[in-house]
Image: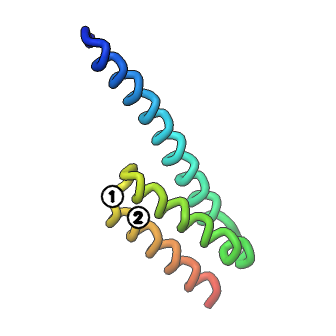
């Protein structure tokens, strides 16, 4: 365990950030899952920009890698294209 005041504070901050990052990641995963299981085209056209924005924010914050974000967005766009065709 940390013995210095600054190290204890750093531990507290890291725990807070970890919880926040877990929340953002889980919320985004749930939104992606809901979008994938959606049967209606209108859901896809309406919710896709919101989900893509969530993915971009995760990449910007460093919660996921930018290439993973690109892969997720690509898969969702491909699924939308096949659903509308």
Q: Secondary structure at mark 1?
A: loop
Looking at the picture, how far across and down is residue 35, in whole percent?
Answer: 63, 64
Looking at the picture, how far across and down is residue 15, in whole percent?
Answer: 41, 27
Which residue is pictured at 64% across the width and 59% down the height? Answer: 34
Q: Is residue 47 left or right of residue 5?
A: right
Q: Secondary structure at mark 2?
A: helix
Give the colouring mode of the picture. Answer: rainbow
Q: Is residue 50 left or right of residue 71?
A: right
Residue 2 quadrant: top left
Comparing 33 with 7, the one in front is 7
Mark 1, Cα crowd under 10 Å, few <14 / some 14-19 / many 20+, is: few
Looking at the picture, how far across and down is residue 7, in whole percent?
Answer: 28, 19
Image quadrant containing the C terminus: bottom right
Question: What residue sits right under mark 1 in the picture?
Answer: 65
Measure how far apart labels 1 and 2 are at the Cα level. Answer: 6 Å
Q: Is residue 46 left or right of residue 19?
A: right
Question: What residue sits right under mark 2 in the picture?
Answer: 69
Q: Report if the CB atoms under discs 1 and 2 are less than 8 Å apart.
A: yes
Which residue is pictured at 37% across the width and 54% down the height? Answer: 64
Up/down of 30 relative to 46, above or below: above
Mark 2, Cα crowd under 10 Å, few <14 / some 14-19 / many 20+, is: many
Up/down of 72 relative to 28, above or below: below
Which residue is pictured at 43% across the width and 35% down the height? Answer: 17
Up/down of 53 relative to 5, above or below: below
Which residue is pictured at 47% across the width and 63% down the height? Answer: 56
Up/down of 31 relative to 82, above or below: above
């Amino acid at each position: 365990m940390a013995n210095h005041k600054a190290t204890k504070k750093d531990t507290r901050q890291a725990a807070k950030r970890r919880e926040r990052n877990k929340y953002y990641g889980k919320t985004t995963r749930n939104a992606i899952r809901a979008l994938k299981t959606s049967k209606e085209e209108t859901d896809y056209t309406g919710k896709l920009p919101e989900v893509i924005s969530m993915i971009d924010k995760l990449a910007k914050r460093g919660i996921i890698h930018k290439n993973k974000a690109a892969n997720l967005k690509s898969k969702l766009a491909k699924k939308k294209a096949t659903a509308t065709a």
